[in-house]
Amino acid sequence: MQIPFLNLKPQHQMLKDQIMDIVSEAIDNTAFVGGKNVNGFEEDFARFCGTSHAIAVNSGTDALRFALLAAGLQPGDEVITTPNTFIATTEAISQAGGKIVFVDIDERTDNIDVEKLATEVEKRVKSSNRLKGILPVHLYGQMADMDPILEIAQKYGLFVIEDACQAHGALYQKNGESHKAGSMGLAGAFSFYPGKNLGSCGEGGAIVTNNADLAQKAKMYRDHGQSQKYYHDFEGFNGRMHAIQAGILKLKLKYLPEWIENRRQNAALYGQLLKDIEGVIFPQEPEWSKGVYHLYVIKVKNRDDVQKKLAEKGISTGLHYPIPLHLQNAYKHLGYKKGDFPVTEKHAEQLLSLPMFPELTKEEIEYVVSTLKKIIHG
C-alpha cells in the first residue's frame, strides 16, 4: 500500500469544475487583482474567524510581516516567539525591523511555554526596555494557551500577534468561552499555502483583526503604502492577493468545517490505535484547545531509522521541524547555542509527522499504525 503524506488530488478533483469557472470568469472579465473575489473572501473569512476585519495578502509570511508593521513595530524592537516553528515566523520579525527573542516550548503542547515566557518577559522589560510584542504560534493546528499570554502582554503593555498559519478554525475554549484562532490577539496571521487546511492553488495569506486602525494600515502595507491611488503615506509592499486565488479560497471555505471534522476523526483514530504502542508519544489536545490537526506529529526514538523503514513500506512522512530555528545558520548572529532550548531540541530529534489529510481512510491509518508498531517492536 502506498500512502502519501499529503494528497491534494481528491479535493481538487471534487472542486475542479467550480475552480475552472472561477478562472474562466476572471479571464472573461480581465479581473486579476482585487475586486469582488477578494472583497467577498475577506468578508467570509472575517466572519469565519469571528473578527471585524480580514485583509487578504499574497502569503502567510506577508500576513505576519504586515501585521507586525501595522502594530507599530520599530527597528530594534524585540518580539518573543518560539524556536519550534517554520522560519516564516521569525523572517517576518526580522524583515519588519524587529529583533527575535526565543522562548522554549511546553513539553506537552509543542507551543510556547507560558511560565518561561513570563520569566523572559520580566527579564527583558528590566534589561532592555525594547520588548514590544509576543508572537505565539498555534503549531500543527493546536492553540497556544492564550489567556496567560494575553495577561502577560497586558501587564507589560505588549501587543500579541497570533501566528495562526497552521490553525484555520482552531478553537480556544476556557471558562465557558470559545474563540477562533487569530481572533484573540491584536491580530492573527494565516497562510493559504496549498498544503494548509485551507489552501489556495498557489500562494496566499490573510490578517484578521478587530482593530480598525490596524486593518487600515495593513491594507496600505500590502499596496505600496497607499491610502488612495498614488497617495503614499509610507513605503509599503506589493502584497496583494490575486483575484483567482481569492475566488478559490472563498469556494473552499464552505467546505473547511467538514474537512476539519474529518481531520479530527482521523486524529482520534490515530490516538486510539497508538495509545498501546510503547515508545510512541502521540498528540493529546490540551484542555483549552480544539485543534484542527494541520499536522499529526508523533515522537519516537531513532526517528530517522523509523522514517526510512516507513518509506520502504510505502508510507510517506514529514519532519516539522528537524532543525530548531536558534540553531539555523540564518540566526547565528542572535548568539544562541545548542542546549539553550532543551525541549525544542529534544523534540526536533524525535518528531515525525504521519500522513494527515481529510480524505485519509480508516484502512490507511490502520496500515500506518500497524507498520509503525512492527518497525518499533519487531
Image (spheres, grey):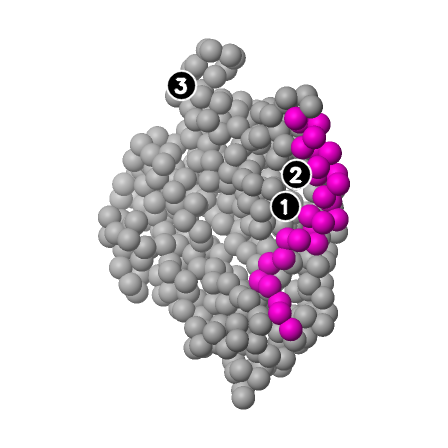
User: Which amino acid type corresponds to the residue marked 1 in the rendered image?
Assistant: Leu
User: Which amino acid type corresponds to the residue marked 2 in the rendered image?
Assistant: Leu
Q: How crowded is mark 2: few (under 14 residues within 10 Å), some or many (20 or more)?
A: many
Q: Mark 3 points at which residue?
A: 234
Q: Which residue is depicted at the point 61% across and 41% down?
A: 200
Relative image position of residue 314 (x, y in whole percent): 58, 72
- The answer to whether residue 17 is left or right of residue 134 is right
Q: How many marks?
A: 3
Of the numbered discs 3 and 2, the one sitting upstream in the chain is: 3
The CA span between labels 3 and 1 is: 32 Å
Q: Name the residue under label 2.
A: 249
Q: Residues within 10 Å of mark 3 (few under 14, many from 20)?
A: few
Q: Does any portion of residue 5 appear in the rendered image?
A: yes
Q: How crowded is mark 1: few (under 14 residues within 10 Å), some or many (20 or more)?
A: many
If the image is split into quadrants, where does the C terminus sit?
bottom right
Q: Where 282 sits versus 33, above or below?
A: below
Q: Does any portion of residue 125 appear in the rendered image?
A: no
Relative image position of residue 19 (x, y in whole percent): 70, 38
User: Which amino acid type corresponds to the residue marked 3 in the rendered image?
Assistant: Phe
Q: Who is closer to the viewer here, 368 or 291?
A: 368
Tags 3 and 1 touching, CB below 8 Å = no
Q: Which residue is depicted at the point 58% across and 51% down?
A: 195
Which quadrant of the structure image shows residue 98? top left
Which secondary structure lies at badge 2? helix
Q: Mark 1 points at which residue?
A: 198
Relative image position of residue 51 (x, y in whole percent): 64, 34
Where are the magenta residues, as a range? 1-27
Q: Which residue is depicted at the point 30% across and 49% down?
A: 330
Tags 2 and 1 touching, CB below 8 Å = yes
